[in-house]
Amino acid sequence: MSAALIDGVAQGEALRERVRDAVRGLSALGTTPGLAVVLVGDDPASRVYVRNKSARTVEAGMRSFDHRLPDDVSEAELLDVIRMLNADEAVDGILVQLPLPPQIDAAKVLLAIDPAKDVDGFHPVNAGRLATGQPALVPCTPLGCVILAKSVRPSLSGLEAVVVGRSNIVGKPVAQLLLAESCTVTVAHSRTRNLPEVCRRADLLVAAIGRPEMIPGDWIKPGAIVIDVGINRVPSPAGGEGRTRLVGDVNFAEAREVAGAITPVPGGVGPMTIACLLRNTVQAACARRGLPLAQALA
Ligand code: NDP
């Protein structure tokens, strides 16, 4: 039987609609949330991401502040911009587009962001709050993974969850969020022994590896929920030389025959990331003003 498709495009749109509603409510109270995005250099992929983020921010009724800095900006100058944004009352969220050029220590820059405005959720204060079950700004892609899993199974409580990947930006925070949902969580990585067997235990399998189609269908428990975070560009068999296509970390065609529900790539986790960024900006705006977060975004 073919698995149900978890539609990240539709889920992302629905979340952005809820964000728009919440922003309308805040604007009626005289508060319009603002998101500042800092882009260093001219990387074409980063430019596209930043353009999308700005467009979606405005579409959601929020204020968007773009700061573009040259590729040769010094670390001190970038830190000055962060300090200025930390102090700016109109700015509720600050996002520094990664990667940064080699003269800049990215960890130092992320540490300089006020944790109350850290809408990417990468600051150690927010990571610590998440790990200790306190209110936190949570990294966007992991949050999107959990929202997608809950779209097909509203209570994840008691499920065996396996997260393959232990990065600070995806694997670890996904694992923390699933623990908070009362899953029994295993975090697997490149040193895990018997990865196929570990994956076969999973009622909920999250793949955040960065290796094209590494997880075959026979690593998946029949009926499992599969969330594929991987975005890998590979040569396309059809369409001739130079053509490429995007695939996930899971072999979709095989997994679809076994899983109960699965996210496609593209169109799964990817579209949730910007929607969660907008959601986090509203959360930051409410928290900074002592206002409750709209129930629809909680
Ligand atoms: P990292 O490279 O930081 O981490 C990859 C993880 O996978 C590591 O923990 C690594 O283990 C593990 N790993 C690598 N090879 C194997 C293997 N053979 N067996 C088991 N585990 C392995 O990647 P990210 O977490 O940043 O990203 C993961 C994927 O998610 C990428 O494809 C990325 O493009 C995508 N992504 C998508 C986003 C979105 O949808 N918006 C956002 C962010 C990422 P170890 O720690 O032992 O090295």
Image (tube, helix red, strand yellow):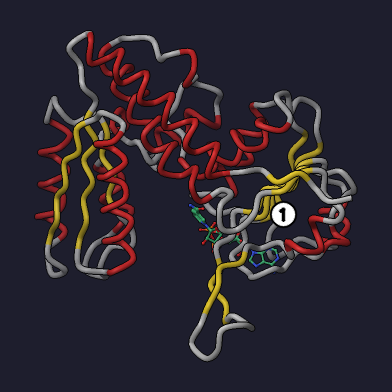
In the rendered image, residue 168, in percent from the top left (x then y), is placed at 51, 50
Ligand 1 shown in quarter: bottom right
| Quadrant of the rendered image containing residue 161 | top right
Query: Residue at coordinates 74% horizontally, 31% vertically from top-left?
Result: 183
| Along the line of sight, the residue nearer the viewer: 66 or 105 | 66
Query: Residue at coordinates 40% horizontally, 15% vertically from top-left?
Result: 293
In the rendered image, residue 250, in percent from the top left (x then y), is placed at 71, 61
30 vs 9, left or right, is left
Q: Which residue is mark 1?
A: 188
Under mark 1, the amino acid is Ala
In the rendered image, residue 27, in percent from the top left (x then y), is placed at 22, 16
| Along the line of sight, the residue nearer the viewer: 195 or 143 | 143
Query: Residue at coordinates 84% horizontally, 61% vertically from top-left?
Result: 217
| Quadrant of the rendered image containing residue 100 | bottom left
Q: Is residue 281 above or below residue 167?
A: above
Query: Residue at coordinates 72% horizontally, 64% vertically from top-left?
Result: 191
**Number of marks in picture:** 1
In the rendered image, residue 140, in percent from the top left (x then y), is placed at 46, 41
Toward the bottom, the furthest residue is 241
2 vs 207, left or right, is right
Dot 1 beta carbon under 8 Å from ligand 1: yes
Crowding at mark 1 (Cα within 10 Å: few <14, some 14-19, many 20+): many
Q: Is residue 271 above or below residue 31?
A: below
| Along the line of sight, the residue nearer the viewer: 265 or 136 | 265
- Mark 1: secondary structure: strand
Q: Is residue 68 above or below residue 172?
A: below
